[in-house]
Image: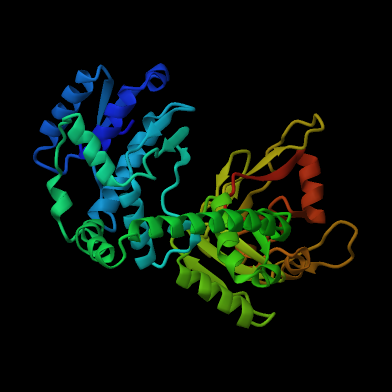
Amino acid sequence: MAYSGGLDSSTLLHALAGMEAARARGLSALHVDHGLQADSRAWSEHCQRFARSLDVSIRRITIEVGPGAGPEGAARRARYGAIETVLAPGEILALAHHRDDQAETVLLKLMRGSGPEGLGAMRTLRPLGLGHAWRPLLDLPQATLRDYASLHDLPWVQDPSNFDMTIDRNLVRAQILPRLRERWPEADASLVMASAWARAASDFIDVAAEQALASLQGLDPATLRYRGWLDLPEALRDPSLRRWLRGLGLSEPTHFQTAELMRQLAEAGDDRQPCVRWPGAELRRHRDLLYASAPLQSPPLDWMARLDAGDVVLPADLGVLRLVSAGDGTPLIEPPFPLYVRFRHGGETIRLSGSEHRRELSQLFQESGLPPWERGRVPLVIAQDGTLLAVADLWTGEEGQALFARLGCRVQWAGRSGTAG
């Protein structure tokens, strides 16, 4: 279990140590030293003494707390990040959060404008790393824990940061909740009950959002039918969008950015390609689909490289272009004249097999449905005289087919990222 040395975790560790079932499951303590207080080393030593007095093994890990929106949040992220790295598959981490903590969390989430998931606050059991986090005390007020500690004469340490009123949770704990309890004695129970209702609503919405996303996602997972998304009930639009982005490994928007996306999708004409971006993600509309990607880079207009038997590493994280064997047993032959790789300059044409006339590359791109923002990121294979031989491995012109047949090769575009097909 997670053991800080405070009242709550000392009570839980003592109670678990008295349970044969907990010991049979391999009860041990984990102490995270944030190094934020001058006495942190002494606290760690106290924790080790108390665990040993209970005949419970204890592990101490030291972390560095980086910058964040606030010291409490930064410490929490660092703490759970470290715990996730040491939690074994299927292992359960017991946490000593109680009903008072839950009530505080609900108020804090409310002040941040959270939706049902946030207002659902802490769950009794949730996934954590390769295991689970378990909060067995959520139904108990801290007064019960304090009575238990007093009864068993348990020692604990007091963190002086608990008295820092610049920390939001401390302010809620010391000033806001006491005032609420004066007026409404059952304030904690009411907040926790409201949290349970919000959690149930969140679970329902989560299932509905998953079903909605399955019906809207395109053949390319990075696409979404935007009109169907706009037609979703308001309660499903935001969670289905976030589920989609999480599945793609992209960052999620703020509520303002989601509202701006909705506005642009609803108001932009069919001839426009609206784009809403935030750190880590870009969303663009093309035809009937919404495309999501990591921030895209544009290759330099004047970039050009020689294409021979080796790999050409393309700029803007666009992977590698190479000539590979055609696979028919013909040995790969070096080109008799220089071949080059570059990107669109505009006005390129290509004659496809069986066609009497050259086609404009822009027209081919449009007919293929390739989104406009991707067209300038497709590498072109050019002959020394400027003839367009191949458009990556998408199309090969008649001149290119004849040349590559003689050389026993074909063009391969590999390792590209962020390109929607």
Relative vertical location of residue 26 with respect to residue 125 in this rendering, above or below? above
Between 219 and 301, which is closer to the camera in this rendering? 219
Q: Is residue 345 visible?
A: no
Relative vertical location of residue 160 with respect to residue 7 in this rendering, above or below? below
| Colour pattern | rainbow
Residue at (54% x, 57% y) in the render: 202
Q: Position of residue 109 (x, y in %)?
A: 38, 61
Between 96 and 215, which is closer to the camera in this rendering? 96
The quarter of the image holding the N terminus is: top left
Residue at (37% x, 34% y) in the render: 94
Q: Position of residue 325 (x, y in %)?
A: 73, 35
Relative vertical location of residue 319 with respect to residue 274 in this rendering, above or below? above
Q: In the figure, is residue 239 to the left or right of 184? A: right
Relative vertical location of residue 22 with respect to residue 332 in this rendering, above or below? above
Quarter-wise, where is residue 164 in the image?
A: bottom left
Quarter-wise, where is residue 119 in the image?
A: bottom left
Q: In the figure, is residue 23 to the left or right of 363? A: left
Q: Position of residue 150 (x, y in %)?
A: 18, 35
Q: Is residue 412 visible?
A: yes
Residue at (20% x, 38% y) in the render: 6
How many marks do you count on the picture? Answer: 0
The quarter of the image holding the C terminus is: bottom right
Between 66 and 135, which is closer to the camera in this rendering? 135
Q: Position of residue 12 (x, y in %)?
A: 30, 33
Between 331 and 37, which is closer to the camera in this rendering? 37
Residue at (26% x, 57% y) in the render: 169
Q: In the figure, is residue 314 to the left or right of 331? A: left
Quarter-wise, where is residue 224 in the image?
A: bottom right
